[in-house]
Image (cartoon, helix red, strand yellow):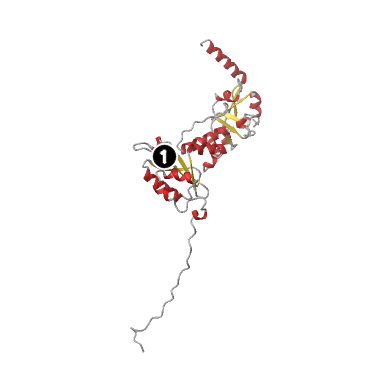
Amino acid sequence: MSSPRTRRRPARHVRTRPVRHAPKPAHRLRPDRVPVPWPKWLKTSKDPLDDYFEAYDEVPTERALFRLFRLEKARNPAFQIEQVDLVPGRHAYLVRYVPAGGWRRDVVPTHVYTEDRDGSFGRQTPDDLLQEIQLHGEEQDYFDHDPEQRFNDGFWDSPGPLYHGTDDPDAVMEEGIGPRSETRGLNNRGVGAAVFTSGEPEAIESYSGCRGCGLVEIDTGAMKRDGYTPRVSQEPEVLEQDLLDSIAHRLGLEYEIEYGDAGIDPATVIIHGPVPARYLRLVSRADDRARRARYNGRSRRHGR
């Protein structure tokens, strides 16, 4: 009988885990779109970002993009990046070259790097991106809310008086204002039947062409108290220019708002529904306004 010291212990069964192969990196799945392996010439490049995008159209991942950013920073200390919110749910970065002692806000970005649906990143100049957005009518894609709905909600949160010009104030005061779909120029041809009003009574004649017309005031506060809140909106071109101005600000650009039609007015409020007569107040009749306009003209000529 063997001693306990020399007795051999039975071998234990070692359980091994199955080998799981790691998924292939994204760049190996698309060898025609990205460099495999990482280009060696980037290590000696004086302008890594420019040289890379001369050779390739995009960066496959955000990690690869930041690798390029680190290379660029090592070559050029003036290099700075800023993350901005453009398309909801996707990352975007502005690039500036700020000299020593300079202020970032005083330097216009040279490029913007935006994330695509597949996670890759391309680059454009901010001006080119803004023009592309305007060309394709993609302004609302750059907001996480509906701008038209926000304007409607904001108006009815604190409604103020609106004004409407008419050639027949007596009929309007008796029947109310019905939505009409007359031709209002190319910029408003898609609005449909609606009531055009303004928050500024002085602007009625200038944009409506209703010289000497009657003026009625719409009590939107009473409409809200009665629970009657039809949808209101801005003119389409005003909304478009406001959105472009907001996007340009995020891109570090100064944007000058310009309207293609002289009749476009930011103070215009379009009511998509009728306005009953009980919410109207006659401010002046057509003949009164015409007589006042003629009197003011004579007064100016005679120095009164």
Give the answer, above or below, for where 267 lies relative to 60.
Answer: above
The percent position of residue 179, horizontal first and vertical second, equals: 64, 32
The percent position of residue 259, horizontal first and vertical second, equals: 55, 29
Answer with the quarter of the image where residue 240 lies.
top right
- Callout 1 secondary element: strand
* 142 or 70: nearer the viewer: 70
The percent position of residue 233, horizontal first and vertical second, equals: 57, 35
The number of numbered discs placed on residues in the rendered structure image is 1
* Residue at 55% over, 40% down: 138
Give the answer, above or below, for where 204 lies relative to 154.
Answer: above
Seen in the image, is 101 located left or right of residue 174?
left
Give the answer, above or below, for where 162 lies relative to 120.
Answer: above
Answer with the quarter of the image where residue 72 lies.
top left
The quadrant the N terminus occupies is bottom left
The amino acid type, in three-letter code, at marker 1 is Arg
Q: Can the viewer see residue 65?
A: yes
* 11 or 161: nearer the viewer: 11
Residues packed near mark 1 inside 10 Å, few (<14), some (14 to 19) or many (20 plus) = many
Q: Can the viewer see residue 146?
A: no
* Residue at 52% over, 55% down: 29
Seen in the image, is 6 located left or right of residue 151?
left
* 14 or 220: nearer the viewer: 14
Residue that protrudes farthest toward the bottom in the picture: 1
* Residue at 55% over, 25% down: 203
Give the answer, above or below, for where 122 lies relative to 224.
Answer: below
* 155 or 262: nearer the viewer: 262
The percent position of residue 117, horizontal first and vertical second, equals: 53, 48
Q: Mark 1 points at which residue?
A: 96
